[in-house]
Image (cartoon, rainbow, N blue to C red):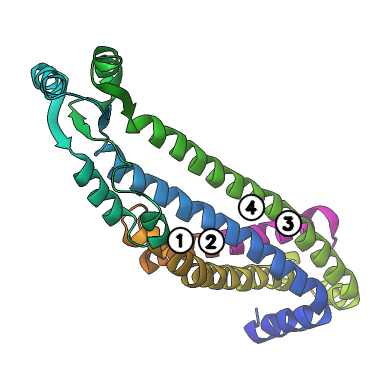
Amino acid sequence: MRANFVLSEVATGLRRNLTMTIAMIITTAISLGLLGAGLLIAGQISEMKTIYYDKVQVSIFLTDDVTDAQRSAIKTGLDDSQEVQTVLYESKEEAYERFKLQFREQPELVNSTPPDALPESFRVQLFNPERYDVIAQEFTGAAGVESVKDEGDFLDRLFGLLNGMRNATIAVAVVQALAAILLISNTIQLAAFTRRTETGIMRLVGASRWYTQLPFILEAALAGFIGALLAFGGLALAKVLFVDETLAGPIQAGIIPPIDWSSILIVSPIIAACGVLLASMAAYVTLRLYVRL
């Protein structure tokens, strides 16, 4: 098998159907970019779960008119509970200082919030965060207690939303992948039709079917690889322009973990392999089913 001949056929095929090749590359790039984004989101969700669920607390917010006796009774009840691991009292002043620190990247929000807007509270760490109901039943409605909140409920809703975003991204990637497969199939059929005379002559002089099909498969694989490179570029651009800029505040505040370059580099080989395999298999199946070479 002459490698130079095969490579020249690949280059010729890509030039002959340039517009369809470009469309195939762009469609593949979008599909792989969405797949990479879904994988990155999944990694972020896992990291956020590790960070947040280990720090889940039950917050017992006190009323504005709570008395010292009521506050002491609540503290004693928490200390005596077998469900409670640690208890931290937070005054109004401490709550406001924590609020200013947490939202230091959003000065408009801090300046519009009066210092006495946040209630004093007890921050309770449980041995088992799933046993929140025990604490809620014991202290909800107690004298001096305004409300009992479980951060786990908020986290469940938050991660449910994030999981939905991840699933939606991957679903769109799958739809785009199907579109890419159909476009690859049409491109390969058109390329084979325009070169039917050449391949027919090759078959007559003894070339194997695999030899005549290989240039078409390599064309598709190369287009898939270029699409993967564009997808990598899109992910890198999204990190620089969106993640590092738009989400800089929440990242610096520790609300969400950053997306490192290492994460993108880990995802890149996956989307490259998917792009090459997707295009190659689509071309191979098309040649076997619809094209006689």
Q: First in sequence: mark 4 or mark 1?
A: 4
Residue 64 in percent (x, y) is at 27, 30
Between the C-alphas of marks 1 and 3, the distance is 21 Å
When the figure is inspected, residue 277 is found, relative to residue 199, above or below; the finding is above
The N terminus - image quarter: bottom right
- Label 4 is placed on what type of residue? Ala
Placement of 126 over or under 88, stated as above or below: above
> Is 58 in the magenta?
no
| Residue bearing mark 3 | 181
Q: Does the CB distance between marks 1 and 2 fall below 8 Å? A: yes
- What kind of element bears circle 4? helix
Q: Amino acid at mark 2?
A: Ile
Label 1 crowding class (10 Å Cα cut-off): few <14, some 14-19, many 20+?
Answer: some
**Numbered circle sitting on residue 173:** 4
Crowd rating for badge 2 (residues with CA inside 10 Å; few <14, some 14–19, many 20+): many
- Earlier along the polypeptide chain: callout 2 or callout 3? 3
* Residue 250 rendering spot, x and y as whole percentages: 38, 57
Residue under the image location 30 percent in, 14 percent down? 141
In the displayed image of the protein, which residue is found farthest to the front?
A: 65
Q: Nearer the viewer, residue 94 or 55?
A: 94
Identified at 29% across, 13% down, the residue is 137
Label whose residue precedes the other's in the sequence (4 or 3): 4
Numbered range of the magenta stretch: 273-293
Residue 201 visible somewhere in the drawing: yes
- Which of the image's four quarters has the C terminus? bottom right
Q: Is residue 277 visible?
A: no
SS under mark 3: helix
Which residue matches tag 2?
A: 271
Q: Which residue is mark 1?
A: 267
